[in-house]
Image (cartoon, rainbow, N blue to C red):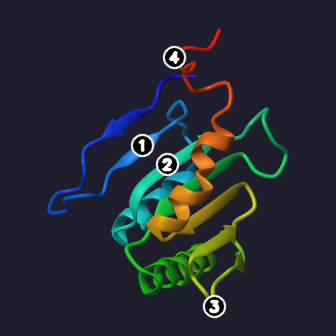
Amino acid sequence: MTQAQTSPAAAGTETAKVVRMTKPAKDELLDFVLKQLDDDQAQEVVTIDLEGKSSIADHMVIASGRSTRQVASIAQKLAEKLKQNGYGPVKLEGLPAADWVLLDAGDIVVHLFRPEVRSFYNLERMWAFGDAPPVAGTA
């Protein structure tokens, strides 16, 4: 695995950045999801390769919205676009509260958070086992 790679933010946005915790993949569905999240101004988008770690999906995408309204909007629009583009229906969980919305798109699971909720659950750290550098002072 490669270390986390950061790509520059899209032109005109200040805080949007994409961090990949995996090798770049030639996965059409993943590319579609990442493009849609970028178009909808999702923040701090992270992809995690789950192959060999879990049978639930091939990739996990974690992103933040600035508010519950933006999280709900991103989730609904992503689900609609996936269906319109032939990727099938998407299962949505957590939409009424929109603090944490889960989209199950088959090979890809997308977690959308409000920033405070995301930092509390810290899914990136939980799923990055084996990929994260060792913590200083432990041997």
At x 44%, y 87%, the residue is: 69
The percent position of residue 13, horizontal first and vertical second, equals 20, 62
What separation in Å lies between label 4 and label 3 (alpha carbons)? 41 Å
What separation in Å lies between label 3 and label 1 (alpha carbons)? 28 Å
> Which image quarter is the C terminus in?
top right
Residue 22 at least partly seen: yes
Dot 2: element: strand
> Which image quarter is the N terminus in?
top right
Q: Which residue is mark 3?
A: 96
Q: Which residue is mark 2?
A: 46
Tell which circle, 2 or 4, labels the residue nearer the N-terminal end: 2
At x 67%, y 80%, the residue is: 94
Q: Which residue is mark 1?
A: 19
Q: Closer to us: mark 4 or mark 3?
A: 4
What separation in Å lies between label 2 and label 4 (alpha carbons)? 23 Å
Type of residue at label 3? Pro
Q: Are marks 2 and 1 in contact (CB under 8 Å)?
A: yes
Q: Which residue is mark 4?
A: 136
The percent position of residue 79, horizontal first and vertical second, equals 60, 78
Density class for disc 3 (Cα within 10 Å; few <14, some 14-19, many ≥20) is few
At x 79%, y 32%, the residue is: 52
Q: How many marks?
A: 4
